[in-house]
Image (cartoon, rainbow, N blue to C red):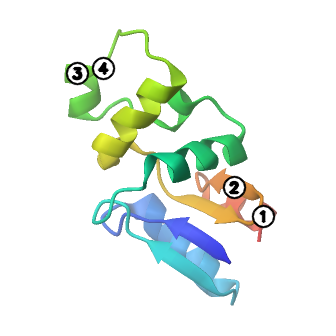
């Protein structure tokens, strides 16, 4: 089952959702700001993306700048920061089985669906 980690207020996330809708694929929408992603699940997403956790962080968010910027953080600490502050997670993220992409640009979603 395809999952999209979605923020309805984000234009890029809405574009990603539209790609999935237009592809006529079944998918699940995870509104991660309403129900935070569990640490284990976020750790798995980072592994599927094949990136360091820090590359999934929205570094321009106020909370990042005030609480984390300039600090040396372990992978686990970065993931814990995203779990505790869901708005730090880059979006949208699309997961399809053992593949995942950050949907920026939205055309990248097509590579895994």
Precedes in sequence: disc 3 or disc 1: 3
Q: Which residue is mark 3?
A: 67
Measuring 69% from the left and 90% from the top, which residue is drawn there?
A: 24
Kindly state the secondary structure of the residue where label 4 is placed.
loop
Q: Could you tell whether 13 is left or right of 93 in the image?
A: left
Kindly state the secondary structure of the residue where label 3 is placed.
helix
Precedes in sequence: disc 2 or disc 3: 3
The image shows residue 83, relative to residue 113, as above or below, that is above
Residue 58 seen: no
CA separation, marks 1 and 4?
32 Å
> Label 4 crowding class (10 Å Cα cut-off): few <14, some 14-19, many 20+?
some
Kindly state the secondary structure of the residue where label 2 is placed.
strand
Instruction: Please say if the residues under marks 1 and 2 sit with CB atoms less than 8 Å apart.
Output: yes
Instruction: Please say if the residues under marks 4 and 3 sit with CB atoms less than 8 Å apart.
Output: yes
CA separation, marks 2 and 3?
28 Å
CA separation, marks 3 and 1?
34 Å
Point out the image quarter for the C terminus.
bottom right
- Disc number placed over residue 68 in the picture, else none: 4
CA separation, marks 4 and 3?
4 Å
């Amino acid at each position: 089952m395809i999952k999209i980690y979605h923020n309805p207020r984000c234009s890029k996330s809405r574009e990603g959702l539209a790609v999935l809708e237009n592809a006529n694929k079944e998918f699940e929408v995870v509104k991660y700001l309403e129900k935070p992603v569990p640490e284990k699940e976020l750790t798995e997403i980072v592994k599927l993306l094949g990136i360091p956790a820090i590359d999934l962080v929205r570094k321009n968010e106020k909370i990042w700048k005030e609480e984390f910027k300039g600090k040396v953080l372990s992978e686990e600490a970065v993931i814990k920061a995203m779990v505790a502050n869901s708005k730090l997670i880059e979006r949208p993220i699309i997961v399809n089985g053992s593949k995942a992409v950050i949907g920026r640009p939205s055309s990248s979603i097509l590579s895994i669906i």
